[in-house]
Image (cartoon, grey):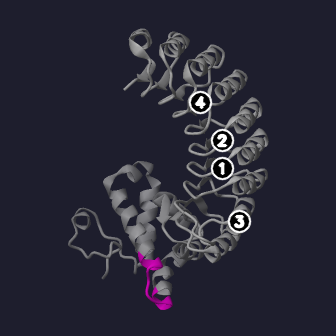
Amino acid sequence: MESATGYGSDSESSEQYPAIAFENVPVVECFLETLLKDPSVLKSAQFQHIRTCILRVCNQITGASSREEVEAKLSLFESLSVDLKLKIFRMIGDIHVDSYIKALDFFALFPFANIVLNMSIDNFDAMFKLSITMATHTSMCNLRLRLNIRPLTTGINDNSSVVLCSILQSNSSLGRLDLFYNELNDTHASYIAHALRSNTSLKSLKLNNNGIGDIGMCALAHMLESNTSLTDVDVSGNRMSRQGAFAFGDALKKNRTLRWLYIGSNKLGKLEIEHIACSLQTNDCLAFLNVSDCFIRDEGAISIAECLSVNKSLVDLNLDSCAIGSRGAQALAAAILHDRSFNLSIAKNEIGMNGREAFINVMKSNENCTICMA
């Protein structure tokens, strides 16, 4: 009889723990129910073996060579109760797939699974089919469409952006959307911002390393003024300058859910950072801010230090490669010296001996501070 691992009975884990005979439904159901009665068992090596077995069977099903093979392997899961199916996939956790075809198979076969899709879009047809499926199957929790550099008409173009927005508007389970390095522009960002005005499930949005300028950034910032679900936004490595930065600053005055914001590697200077810092004086939810690789200089660092004297929610700040000198470093050190838990990264700046000594004194006086100056 074939074991669930598909590797026979001579594997090391199969010697330690009983193999799951997936041809015997009552035995499987009884075995899983026994495991689930004791939550502590789920942390054991035995549970890890069971989890691996089930994952491998899932992969075998989607890689089956014929429909008959799929139906034969699927008969076990079809025989289990709905409650037990839910428990199985809660045990498994996120299932990662790397193509929309495999995602469609999982949607059809395992509607209870949490699907994480990591893929490149081959063409518009792939995006369209994916959107249609996601409109009816709401188990997708994480969608990563990365590195789709667009030659001619392939990749993420205007048409596929419209379809992507339909996904955001129709799917209520998607929690994370990663569109890193897709040559997205202002139009794409505006589409996404419009779709997210009515989306209440997305928690994390990554648009880093694209080509989004101030128009797209303003659209995203205006969306954040009313959005109540996003907690993590990454727009670093784009073309944002003063107009976009001012719009994000205004959004921070109104938004009450965003906790992580990445705006580094944009065209931001001391004036842009001063506006954002001023806005943070009335923001009580943002905990992490990354403005690395921006030319904010001492004046920008001083404005952030002044913000920290008022803002108590910000506890993690990245100011790497920001052209900060001794004056800015000493101002920041004074702001986090007493009674504050804080993580600061200020590497690759010219803070000098005075700035370095100021930070060393902070770490001596405040054991809750972690400062990276390397």
Q: Is residue 61 magenta?
A: yes
Residue 356 visible here? no
User: Is 328 or 2 nearer to us in this picture?
Assistant: 328
Residue hosting label 3:
158
Image marks 1 and 2: residues in contact by CB distance under 8 Å: yes
Q: CA separation, marks 4 and 1?
A: 24 Å
Q: Of callouts 1 and 2, which one flags the residue occurring earlier in the amino acid sequence?
A: 1
- The residue sitting at 44% across, 79% down in the picture is 63
Q: Taken as a whole, is the magenta stretch helix, strand or loop?
A: helix
**Residue 5 within the magenta-colored segment of the rendering:** no
Residue 361 position by quadrant: top left
Question: How many other residues sit within 10 Å of disc 3, few (<14), some (14-19) or many (≥20)?
Answer: some
Which circle, 3 or 4, is nearer the viewer? Answer: 3
Q: Which residues are magenta?
A: 60-69
Q: Which amino acid type is shown beneath numbered disc 3?
A: Asp
- Residue 287: numbered disc: 4
Residue of label 2: 240
